[in-house]
Amino acid sequence: MTHDITIIATFVLYIGLMMGIGVYYYRRTRNMSDYFLGNRKLGAWVTSLSAEASDMSGWMLMGVPGFAYLAGLNAGWIAVGIAIGTWANWHFVAARLRKYTELADNALTLPEFLQNRYGDHSGLLRVVPAIFILIFFILYSSSGFVSAGRLFETVFGIPYEYAIFLGAGSVVFYTLVGGFLAVSRTDFIQGVMMFFAILVVPICGAMASGGFEATVAAVESIDASLLDPFTKVDGTTIGFIEVVSLLAWGIGYFGQPHILVRFMAIRTSKEVAQATHIAMTWVILSLAAAVAVGIVGRVYLTTPLEGTASETVFLVMTNQLFPPIVAGLVLSAVLAAIMSTASSQLLVAASAFAQDFYRTIIHKDAEQNELVWISRASVLVIASIAILLGLNPNSFILDMVSYAWAGFGAAFGPAILMSLFWRRTTRNGIIAGIIVGGVTVLVWKQFALFGLYEIVPGFAFSIAAIIIVSLLGKAPAKEIQETFDAVGRSEI
């Protein structure tokens, strides 16, 4: 890879801009609502692009193209599942969650929402969810730092072990000082950058390969199965279990804390419809382009990429397609993707520790300023653990993301859906669902039973546990049911 001074300069300027935004919002962060939800003042454009940028991390610009490079249109099943899941999340969950979290004593985090939703005074609905948030966000954040390590290794020409610290340090700095306001504003910028970068690369790659028809013909000459979503590269037909597993990425959306928190922060639920249209346009075009990057890369790149190197197809194409100044801007979009998601994850994990561990168990009377500083300290600790887990350069980014994605989807997805839409759900039912869903993913992953993606059994068993335990217990108190009914009438 070339380490052109222009590319490096562009990177340094971009990182400086993001850190500058962090410092600016550091001065505007006065309390926990500011630090975690931006005091619920985000508009439709910022909310939608922030949600999608924090969702589509380096795995969209590196993991999905790498999968498509190896498997062709088989990777499209993930894209379809994600697109459907994104729409369902915005359409069914966003507005109701925004209303309910404010009516539930202005809850700032998902565990706090669950605690307030069920009037729980035991602390279990803060502590149990926080445990799984910390476990799976450490894994998720680690995947982002692996992406950052490969990117900085490519751009600066430094060993991976140093590159991962440099990339992670950039993310941690502006998360540490700016909180939610900084992350959301930078996410908007980064969402725009990611969108144009992922569209430009496959188009330019196809044009450089002789045009779209010539590119398709070249792909067919390499391996016609690359253009058949039902045929794998080894010539076998993709099985039902495999299709279900790939599409099942979609159900994970209902339980992703770093995405759901964006719904909680939008200015008013009335802006959700506009935000949904913006988000879906972004997601559909971006995912289609991500798959196209991998397939076009098979034709454009003359040197094959093997193993984890396949996940650098976007980086390699960018370096070869564009002059240094343009390549620097496009590669900064990869950094944008990594920074947006990793920072969001660190922020939610920090909120889980400060609000749901520290305030619940250690210091119940902690003041706002103290909690902000505890949150910032926990960002450093969580990031350090995530970096240590990511030091192995042979880890596949998409594999790491899929594990964490399944964990959140199974532990929290059913809990959020049932809390929002089933009046009869009880506190014990939610606790049972979170534990069953999270543990099922952790266990199923180790045995890979039937080749089925662990989110499927985890999600199903979690819903079953919530229903069974809720029906076995007493119905929720009258005031809890009245708040549930008030959500539907609310104009918030």
Image (cartoon, grey):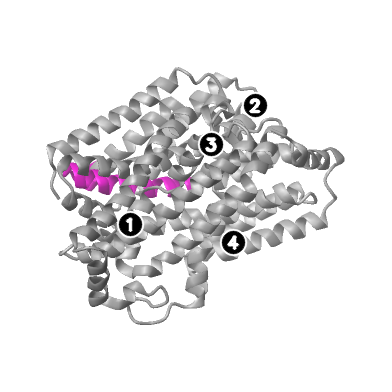
Kindly identify the amino acid type of the residue bearing the numbered disc 4.
Gly
Question: Disc 1 marks which amino acid?
Answer: Ser
Q: Is residue 400 left or right of residue 217?
A: right
Is 230 left, or right, of 94 in this rendering? left
Residue in front for this viewpoint, 197 or 212 = 212
| Amino acid type, mark 3 | Ala
Can residue 370 be seen here? The reply is yes
Which is nearer the N-term, disc 3 or disc 4? Answer: 3
Residue topped by disc 1:
395
- In-front residue for pair 309/352: 309
Q: Mark 3 = which residue?
A: 44
Upstream in sequence: badge 1 or badge 3: 3
Of callouts 1 and 4, the N-terminal one: 1
Q: Position of residue 268 (x, y in %)?
A: 63, 33
In magenta, the rendered stretch is: 137-162
From the image, tell me which residue sits under label 4: 458
Q: 10 Å neighbourhood of mark 3: few (<14), some, or many (≥20)?
A: many
Residue 97: give x, y in percent of width and height. 65, 42
205 up-or-down from 265: above or below? below
Residue behind mark 2: 364
Residue at (49, 44) in percent of width and height: 278
Drawn side of residue 335 relative to residue 410, left or right: left
- Foreground: 232 or 393? 232
| 1 or 2: tag closer to the N-terminus | 2
Circle 2 or circle 4, nearest the eye: 4
Establish if 162 lies above or below 35. Answer: below
Q: Is residue 235 magenta?
A: no
Between the residue at mark 1 and the residue at mark 3, the CA separation in whole angstroms equals 36 Å
Q: Earlier in the sequence, mark 2 or mark 3?
A: 3
